[in-house]
Each structure stands twice: as C-alpha cells, then as structure tokens.
Amino acid sequence: MKTIILGPPGTGKTTTLLNLVDEFIKQGIRPKQIGYFSFTRKAATEAATRASEKFGLDIETDLENFRTLHSFAFRKLGITKEKMMGPDDYREFGLKCGIPIKTASFSNDDGTFNCDNEYLTIINTARVKRMDLLEYYDSRQNILDIERNTLYLLSEELKKFKKEKRLKDFTDLLEDFILKEIHPSFEVLFIDEAQDLSLLQWDMVRCIWANVKKTYIAGDDDQAIFKWAGADVDHFIALKEEVDDIKTLDQSYRIPGGPIHELSQKIINKVEKRFNKIYKPRPEEGILKRYSDITQVDMSEGNWLILSSANHFLDDAKDLCEIQGWYYQYRGVNSVSLKLLLALNNWEAWRKGAHLNHLEIRNIYEYVGSNVLPGFKKGKTFQSDDKYTLKQCQEKHGLLTDKIWYEAFEGLDTITENYIRNMRANGEKINKNPRIKMSTIHGAKGGEADKVLLLQDITGAAIETFSHDPDELHRLFYTGATRAKKELHVLDPKNFDRAYIL
C-alpha cells in the first residue's frame, strides 16, 4: 500500500510522519524495520532526533535507517570515506585534462553537486536525470558556450580517472545501489521531501519499496525548487496514478490569514502542473508591506529572514545592517565571529568581576595584543582547573589593561570596531544566533521567521531559464513568501525588467 501525504507550508508534515512512526512502533514493528529517508541530511537528522526524544530510542542503533538516500547507499555498499571523490581529486582531474577546477564537491547535506566548471555540472546533472549526456546537451537552450565533443570526452575521461583511482562520487553510489538490485527489507517506508528527488533517486526508491508493505511518500510539489539540480517534480506528481491514497494536511500552523496567505495563493495558482490542494491559514491576520528602497525597512526589532533568488542581491541588505548596527547571519556565517563574540562578552563580564577559566582568558589574550606582556601571551601560567579575575591577571599573569573593549582590544579594523560599537549602542544582543538571517530562497527552504523581507530581483540567466518553465519561478517565490509567520515585507527590484513582481 502506498500513500502520498501532501504537506503545504507549515502544516506539520514531519510531526505527522513521526506520529505514524509512533503508531507502527506501538503495533510492535521494530524501529530498525522502519526506513525513513529524506532529501536533506538536515531533515533526516531532525526526524531522527525528534523520534529519539519522543520514543526514547538511540539514534545510532535503533534509528540507523533514518538518513538520506546517499547515506543509505554509502552504508549498504560498504564504501569508505577514503574511496569518495573529494575536492582535491577533482582538482587533480582538472590539471590532468587541462581544465580549471577550483571548487568541486558534493554537498553532505543533500548530495547536490557544486562545481565552478559547467562541463562537470552538466555531466552530473544528466546522470541524475537519467538522460544520455548528448541527448541532455541537445535539450538545453542555454549552454551554447559548451562544446559538444569536449563535453563527451571529459565525461569519458572522468570515468577513466575514477576507475584508475578506485574512487566513487555520490551519484555513483545511487547508480551502484540500483545496478546491484539491493532490496532492503522494511516493514514500513517513509520518503520525505519527495518533491526534491531526482529521477535517479526515484529509481533507488523503487528498489527500496519493492518488498515493503506500506510506503508513505511525503512532500509538497508547490515547494519543488531544485529542478536546476536535477529534481523531478513531474515524477512526484505522476505518482498519483500509482498510489492507493492521497492525503492533504489542510491546516498551516505558520501562514497567517489575510494578505500573506492571499498573496501566496495568488502566486501558486499560476502553476499549471500541480496537485490541487487547499489549506487553511492561522486565524491571526498577517501584515504585508511594500518598499521602494531597502533603507525604508526598519529591522531594529524582531527576528528577520531576508530572502533573494541569488546571493549577490543581498549585498544592500548586508550594508544596511552594518550601517545600522544590526547583528546578522549571511550564508550561515555570523557578522561577528564566534571567537570574537566570546572574547567581547567575556571581557565585559570580566570587567564587572566575573571569574574566567584559562581557555576563555587565552582567547581574550589573542585580541588585547600589546596589553599582555610577551611571556604571558600563551597563558602558560594558568592552571586548567582554576578561574581568575581580571585583577588577578593584572597582578600575576601579564595583563596590562582593564579598559573598555574598544580601547583594550587591538587589531580590529575600523569598520569592525565601529560596527560592534553601533550594535552595543543600539542594545543589540550579540549571541550565537543573530536575529537577522540572510539567505537565498533555496538555502532557506524549510525555515521560517516572524518577519520576512523578500527581494524580487532575478538574474538575466534565470529569466532565460524560467522562460521555458515559468512554473519553477512561481514555486520559488511561493516558497519565499510562505516563510513568514507574521509579517511579509516585499522590496521593489532595482530593475523591473529583471524581477518577479509579487
């Protein structure tokens, strides 16, 4: 029996799946007989963690089959990490073939291939789409700069290189799993984030569910935004002809009623090929605001998620945060490093009478520079089990100052110092989790925030791509708009000819 569970934004899809897991465990099915596979490692880990906490199970032993498809194939095939293609191997291949390769690796989170060489990207994309390489090349409209013969020759050389080195890549793992016809025995199977699976991954899924009594396929075709990486949402939609039942989770616990819900529905109703589904928003009314310039956006309070279709569109938002003294995160990196953050916070606490351990003090010593006598910089005079006041370090451990941080710390550039002083003056909390986070829409999928700022700009290349498949663009901005829990803020594009107008 196969069931599709459609989970619109914020409808509690993971909770629903884990409730089903709970039911089957109560029925006597052992956790090891349950397969739970997700497109991203983050989602698989979240599910395993929540299941572990809910059922009192060990993640490593009881929930060993809660993972990504790549991870499962890796484990079943008995591959070691040393046998996997890494960035250095790709660079070596590039040197051998005379092509520049600076960055080439498979994401440990979702298995997507990230490479600065378009030839290698096309080769891998054709494989995950289960298409002949030259047939895929001929089907593309925007790769005219790629030579057809060179593409084929590089593909063959890459095969030879991996064979000689006895190496595999993530795509090889899935292909080998299918070729070896591995059919693991599960009582129940869960496939999460199904809208993001490639045709190659679907072929692997079919191998897995061959001997499974009950299969649940969960996802939302409206949030299918990874077609560029080979995802095949059409295959997911077509499964409606094969399954026994389709269920839609119809209550969102994220999307507020009113203009935000109305706008998101207006966007997604433009998609031609989709599951028809209706869900209810929260009863609370959301707020929708529009701006002509980013300087009009007041982000001095609250938790924010700033989203764009490409990273470089976030530059103005970063500049605004730095000018205003707002603490932010960009592509997972905080605007103040954790090391400096700890030094700053510990220094201020130290000046107020706190006791610090030797590790905390050594970190501070790295920033105060000449304010520590040379023979004490490495902190060798400290006992690992003791804690020290600032005054004690002045008397016995080479510290020469007790001034405020911006007078005591040396080596900080003027921009960084002024930025931190602005944050301090604003009362901005500088901790591990900045309240403002910036990301591409792709990078924020699955995330949410009380307040979302959505940028409408898109690249010229994206316009060309989306002209052949406008559904993908609609899904992208629908996904962005549905991250907002309370407020959605929409910024006008710099160029209306290169924009998705909401």
Image (spheres, rainbow, N blue to C red):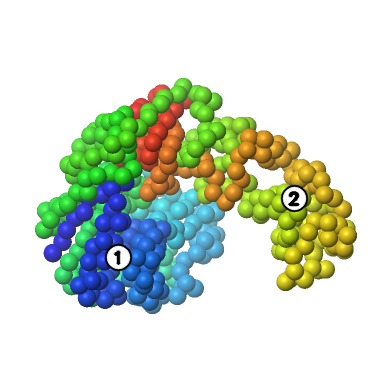
Q: Residue furthest top?
A: 292
Residue 333: tell me if it is visible: no
Residue situated in front as seen by the camera: 231 or 464: 231
Residue situated in front as seen by the camera: 81 or 166: 81
Residue situated in front as seen by the camera: 484 or 160: 484
Asked if residue 485 is positioned above or below residue 2 in the image, the reply reads above
Residue at point 11%, 58% (across, down): 244
Residue at point 29%, 34% (across, down): 257
Residue at point 49%, 50% (across, down): 116
Check the picture and name the quadrant holding the C terminus.
top left
Residue 417: tell me if it is visible: yes
422 sits to left or right of 321: right
- Give x and y (percent) for residue 11: 28, 48
Report the amino acid beneath label 2. Answer: Lys
Asked if residue 395 is positioned above or below residue 469 in the image, the reply reads below
Asked if residue 206 is positioned above or below residue 13 in the image, the reply reads below
22 sits to left or right of 406: left
Which SS class for mark 1? strand
Q: How many marks?
A: 2
Report the amino acid beneath label 1. Answer: Tyr
Residue situated in front as seen by the camera: 477 or 58: 58
- Give x and y (percent) for residue 198: 29, 55
Q: Residue furthest front?
A: 353
Residue at point 39%, 73% (across, down): 58
46 sits to left or right of 390: left
The circle drawn on residue 352 is 2
- Give x and y (percent) for residue 66: 34, 67
At label 2, counting other C-alpha atoms closer than 10 Å, the crowd grade (few under 14, some 14-19, many 20 or more) is few
| Sequence-first tag of 2 and 1 | 1
At label 1, counting other C-alpha atoms closer than 10 Å, the crowd grade (few under 14, some 14-19, many 20 or more) is many
Q: Are the residues flagged by discs 2 and 1 in contact, CB closer than 8 Å?
A: no
Q: Which residue is mark 1?
A: 36
